[in-house]
Amino acid sequence: MLKPKEFDLTQLQQKVSSSLALLGIAGVYEEEVAFVSGTAIRSKPSLLPNICGRPATVIPEEEVAGAEGEDDQLRRYRCLRVPAWSGEVAVALLYRFRVMGDNLYVEANWRGLLPIAKQYQNVDNIPNKPRLMVLFSRFVLNVIIAPFYMALSPFIILIRIINAYEGYRRRATLKASILDNPLFNYGADISLRERFSSDEYEKYFQYLDKEMYVKIIDREFLDEIVNFLDEHNIDTSIIRERAEAILNHGVIVSGGNINAKNVAAGQGAIAGVMKAVGSHAKG
């Protein structure tokens, strides 16, 4: 049996990133991202300069360097993004590698965005050159409602003043809550893009394209990991045996993960054990 070759996780990450970049998928790009627990960010001044302000959107390199395995509240990922259909549909693969003892752990999570909900797309239905009758009807409507708006304008202004005061009170209450609660959660429950997304695909082809990107990237992602380990004389027989199960049962696709120590997928699947490189693997 060949002796395993020494490698570090940077080599594995570069190998996978280079392979994914060569897939030829239009618009695909990769970046490094980090996630921090919203209740723990208060203990990190570089991420929260003002406790009553917004957290930083860029994390200093020294803050995340070496944090993996030492800081349970901070996780560093590579993020492969695939925008499709002019941004109407987008999928992203977040993945990371970690060595724990003589075990290699690979985590891969898929996230997706559906098209914007139809009620927010009305502007797309406005014709570039409205017909004369449409313009005339709008003119007549504005002439009719203008006097009513003038009569109601004092009340409209009063309502806006009240709303501004209520906004001030909400901000003051929020500030007091932040100051009184050391475990205040600065995290966002949902992004604006997710909030305004539809709950279904507008076109069936959008769903098919999403499935296509996921399957192509999944296959390449898993193949490159196996090839890299083979090049370093590490037994990958268990991963090869379970490759189809991993791809078909959502261990990667549906927010799951591959654990090189315990690789299992689907109901009734049996977990196997794959020893990584032991002392030859460096985090």
Image (cartoon, rainbow, N blue to C red):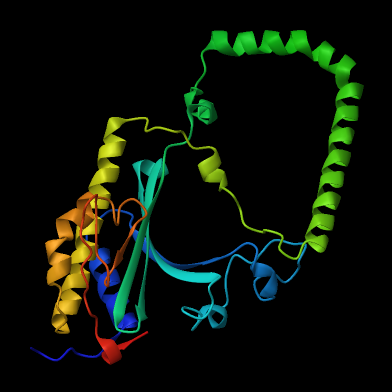
Residue at 89% x, 34% y is 162
Q: Residue at x 30, y 57 (%)?
A: 252
Location of residue 126 in the rendering, given as x and y in whole percent from the top left corner? 51, 23
When asked about the image quadrant of residue 11, the answer is bottom left
> What is the x, y in percent for residue 166?
85, 39
Observer-nearest residue: 234 or 269?
269
Q: Nearer the viewer, residue 36 or 181?
A: 181
Q: Quadrant of residue 164?
A: top right
Instruction: Note whether residue 274 is visible.
Output: yes
Q: In front: 145, or 174?
A: 174
Say if 238 sits above or below 229 in the image: above
Q: Quadrant of the N terminus?
A: bottom left
**Number of marks in picture:** 0
Residue 78 in the image: above or below residue 189: below
Determine which quarter of the picture holds residue 99: bottom left
Where does the image place residue 42, in percent across and percent down from the top left? Answer: 69, 69
* Side (left or right) of 51 relative to 28: right
Quadrant in which the C terminus is drawn:
bottom left
The residue at 16%/81% (across/down) is 234
| Figure check: 165 above or below 230 | above
Q: Going by the image, does 246 lie left or right of 37?
A: left
- 73 lies above or below 257: below
Residue at 34% from the left image edge and 50% from the top image edge: 254
**Residue 22 shows up from this direction:** no
Residue 74: where, in percent of width, then height?
53, 71
